[in-house]
Image (cartoon, grey):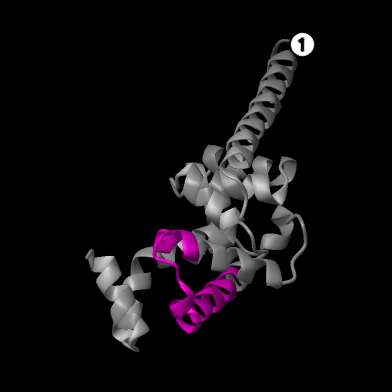
Amino acid sequence: MSNESALIEAARRGSAAAFTELVAAYREKLLRFLLTRSPSFADAEDALQDTLINAYRYLNSYDPRWRFSTWLYRIAINSASRARRPDTVELDELGDEESDPLRQCIADANRENLWLTARRLLSEEVYTAMWLRYVEDMSVKDISAVLERSVSWTKVNLMRGRKTLEGEFANTATEEKSKAYG
């Protein structure tokens, strides 16, 4: 029995300390994931709190055939989608750079620009699949479980998402070259 399995069993028996230790490894990753789905840091923190409360409340419904992280991300997606938020977030709406961690992350440049572009171009599900694959390093099987889609759907949409982004960045590079030399 792994340490995670032992913690799950202890938490199921009512140990709050075991649950706290269990989710500690996922807390920052979940918050980072929820930041991509929320209009503000405060909303992401609220969604994280809802995720952890629901995970504790429904821990007995966890199916050990799946990874615990997969189950947590499914709850996080549900928590984030329950929160009302606009489809896109303008940089001006993000607030003061000094006080908003999301704005500081976005200001970090290329990687964040990729995810902002992905957020703008891709459907919610494809964006989520790509985030889970390339940021959270989840397997295709686990992503399929989180999104409640087939493995083949996940593979096809990861490929389509990559092609969409490659096309967008190829067009951007071509436009920048023609401006520089034109």
Q: Is residue 99 visible?
A: no
Q: Which image quarter is the N terminus in?
A: bottom left
Quarter of the image for residue 173 reads top right
Q: Residue 141 in the image: x percent, y percent?
A: 49, 46
Q: Considering depth in this image, is 140 or 125 the residue closer to the camera?
A: 140
Q: Secondary structure at mark 1?
A: loop
Q: Residue 142 in the image: x percent, y percent?
A: 48, 51
In terms of secondary structure, what is the magenta stretch mainly? Answer: helix
Above/below status of 90 relative to 127: below
Q: Residue 137 in the image: x percent, y percent?
A: 43, 45
Q: Is residue 37 visible?
A: yes
Looking at the image, which residue is at 45% across and 71% down?
A: 62
* Other-residue count near label 1 (Cα within 10 Å), few / some / many at <14 / 14–19 / ≥20: few
Q: Residue 181 in the image: x percent, y percent?
A: 71, 10
Left or right placement of residue 101 versus residue 78 in this view: left
Looking at the image, which residue is at 66% across and 32% down?
A: 160
Above/below status of 126 relative to 60: above
The residue lying furthest to the bottom in this view is: 14
Looking at the image, which residue is at 77% across and 62% down?
A: 86
Amino acid type shown at disc 1: Gly
Q: Which image quarter is the C terminus in?
A: top right
Instruction: Write the start and end of the magenta stretch as one range.
Output: 44-71
Above/below status of 20 relative to 30: below
> Can residue 64 be found in the magenta stretch?
yes
Q: Considering depth in this image, is 109 or 84 the residue closer to the camera?
A: 84
Name the residue beneath numbered marker 1.
182
Looking at the image, which residue is at 42% across and 67% down?
A: 27
Above/below status of 152 relative to 72: above
> Can residue 144 be found in the magenta stretch?
no
